[in-house]
Image: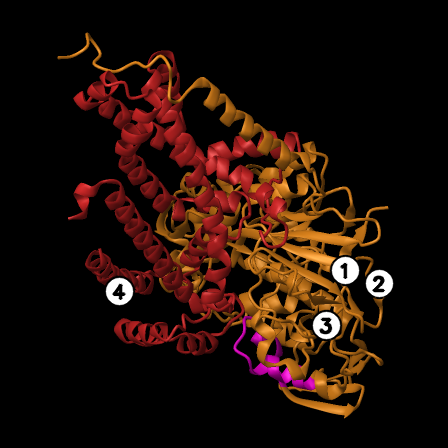
Amino acid sequence: MTYGGTATTHFKEDAVSSKSVLGGIAVAAALALTLTGCVGSNGSSSSKNETLSIGALVDVASFDPSQSDVGHYMQYLQPAYDTLIRLDDQGQLQPMLATSWEYTDPGNTVLELRLREGVEFSDGTPLTADAVIASLKRFQASNGPRASALASVTDFDAVDDTTVRLTLSTPDPALTHNLALVAGMITNPAADAGLASMPAGTGPYVLDTDKTRRGDVYTFTRNGNYYDPEAFPFDEIDVRVLSDGTARLNAVKTGQVDSAFGIPSQLSEAEASGLTAVSAPGDWQGLFLIDRGGVTNPQLGDVRVRQAINYAIDGDALLDTIAFGQGAPTTQIFYPGTPAYDDALDDAYPFDSDKARALLAEAGYASGFTLKMPSIDAFLPDVYPLVKQQLADVGITVEYDPLTPSAGLAPFLSGSYPAFVFSWGASQNWLDATLLLSANGTFNPFHVDDPTIADLMSKIAVASDEQQAELYKQLSAHVVEQAWFDPFYAIDNLAFVGKDVSVTPQPQQVVPSIYNYKPAQ
Amino acid sequence: MVIFVLKRITAAAVLVVVVSFLSFVLTWITPGDPARSILGVTATPEQIAAKRAELGLDQNVFAAYASWVGRALTGDLGASWFSNQPVAESIAARLPVTLSITVVAILIAGVIGIGLGLWAAARRGVVDSAIQPFAVLGFALPNFIVAIMLVTVFALNFRLLPATGWVDFGDDPSGWARSITLPVIALSVAATAAVAQQTRNAAIATLQQDYVRTLRGRGLSTRSIFLKHVLRNSAPVALTVLSLQFIGLLSGAVVIEYMFALPGIGALTVGAATQQDQPVIQGAVITVVLAVVVVNLLMDLAYAWLNPKVRS
């Protein structure tokens, strides 16, 4: 027996009555009001306690400078560690723990640094030459990302309590620059063991473990033993890990952080929300034509072919498409404003497909050739098809080998490919020259030895500053002429800043140094 | 009951071993060199080789797995190759974050979903026709789309709730509640829709049974029928859906964790997998496997409690 039609029981007096549903809604609404009603502070500080809040792209790797890289990680280390030398926001070397330094021999192999007096570690231990040497030796012996920074130092001497002498096996023009980065961060000799999770240095702040939550937010509060507290207007620095770009931008918009690392695609949205965008030149992106000796790809061994590639790619158009115009075209591998950078070289390779084809024909490759390169979807995904198309226009067929991001750097540095697209963070000229140009440089996987480059570099090693600038420019001109690379453009490093602070960008560093932040006037 | 639980625990142990071995091997054979990733662009080949030896990457995979198991059995899960933080410590810190949002989301999905499902089954007609499309829409919308809409309205435009950030319950309970509100709403929409739909169907099926008509005819009140019979018969279905949703949310919450900058286990796992941070991957995998096992066990026990026929 069934009821008619739909055999379901309809109840008029309902167990799930409208009253109970409405009651439930009322409870939910009351709860919501309670939650949102207390509109508390969103991370902004009271007037007495100035707090700087920074949104970081990456989590800290290690609070031990010897196990840390530079770049994004500097904002985790600079609060707790002073460096021997400081890079100011113009990229110039300034005194910090060392008040002066000089090479005492004509061959630039003996560096003497005079230390500041009255400096203490965060636990009150005085900073002495012995402590500095212990820290430097420890850095040199560690197998960390920047261990090569002190590779040329053979002897460490404490001439007296405030003078340190470093003896080098070979001149190293990058040494003073490296002493302004992680190599120069002096660690407390008494705190060797736990440094990875608890920093111990002479810096203006100390890590507050109560308020710190790993992977989320790191809070630094003032170091009572610091020698120059007036130079630091903030009582507290919070570094928040915000790996997602949208989350980072939202955090600045809502005031949860004062400043955050920005990406070019967000620029218009950030400015529309009333944020300030602060920028400085950053990575140059382009082709590394590493098989310039023609070992696996004979065509690349001919300089005309490499020059043709430079003419074939329209860096300006790529800049507009990929980076929304946030950057500047370049033909050089060196950082703008450094001694090696020569503005005159920027016109070396204007976009000219006809010239490219003419050069290829002259070299005997009028019918083109095949170029095999790796591609990584997660890394500059828009660049690959554009490069392929522009090279195809002049007869060069690009075959991409897709790789996963986890493949890391190994495929690029193993010599498996004759060329690849890359993003290079140029910094100090000698560092870049050593890595990119010297015969055993890590990013010269085919170990191509160019006598002009070798000759210029050996002269630069012993030259005075003025002579160095001239020699560096010759080096840059030679590299551009030999077309060992094809830089498309240099992208800008961006920071989005809220109303409470002002910040100047740091040249050669992807994020501003903590020294560059001030409360807004 | 005791034997039932023991059998389940044995099965769980076997599952943990198998899954941990598979994930170890998969991470091992993935192309890429974590040592190079840790050391960065300025490292020399000698440094890389030394790092690989330090991480144990120069052994064969079985020896490496055996030494991992040996240490894991003593409670030592190692430390992250990239952040040097002990794995057990980072999981213990991050698991409560993910559990906060997923458990609360499941509770809300359960209460509202069952409520809506029963309401639709009881009323049919307009109510049912109104709830059905919402259920479909709620299930189809990806949770991050919902999250974007919520953030734009409630966090950016009206500044009522935070757009990002996690507050610990122990530090500030109302801050904690505010920090999880938007993520929980985003996560619970799909689960609520699924539960509502399944509960509705199960309730309607129960209401169509002859014995329900008989009870009604005997004068049993509607409320009694719903609470004693319909609810009890729909509960297993709802519980199954809820447990499946919960298991999906344990890792599925990762996008929400990234968007709201919540330091949860999903974000930890994805980050570790991208970098090939083996100790963290192993720790996270085991944690999730154990969580799934516990949830399944609880669900089986609840099912047995609700339905005596299963207890044999």
The alpha-carbon separation of the residues under discs 4 and 3 comes to 48 Å
Q: Which chain has been coloured orange in this picture?
A: A
Secondary structure, mark 2, is: helix
The alpha-carbon separation of the residues under discs 2 and 3 comes to 15 Å
Indicate the position of residue A193 as horizontal and vertical percent values. Answer: 58, 80
Q: Earlier in the sequence, mark 1 or mark 3?
A: 3
Which color was chain B given? red
Asked whether residue B75 appears in the rendered view, the answer is yes
Secondary structure, mark 1, is: helix
Checking the image for residue A83, the label placed there is 3
Mark 1 is on which residue type? Tyr
Indicate the position of residue A338 as horizontal and vertical percent values. Answer: 71, 60
Q: Which residue is mark 4?
A: B17
Asked whether the residues under the numbered discs 1 and 2 touch, taking CB atoms below 8 Å apart as contact, a structural biologist would say yes
Q: Residue at x 39, y 72 (%)?
A: B75
Indicate the position of residue A409 as horizontal and vertical percent values. Answer: 44, 62
Q: Which residues are magenta?
A: A133-153
Q: Nearer the viewer, residue A71 or B235?
A: B235
With A260 as the anchor, is B104 left or right in this view?
left
Figure label count: 4
Mark 3 is on which residue type? Thr
Image quarter (top left, top right, bottom left or bottom right) of the N terminus of chain A: top left
Q: Which residue is mark 1?
A: A515
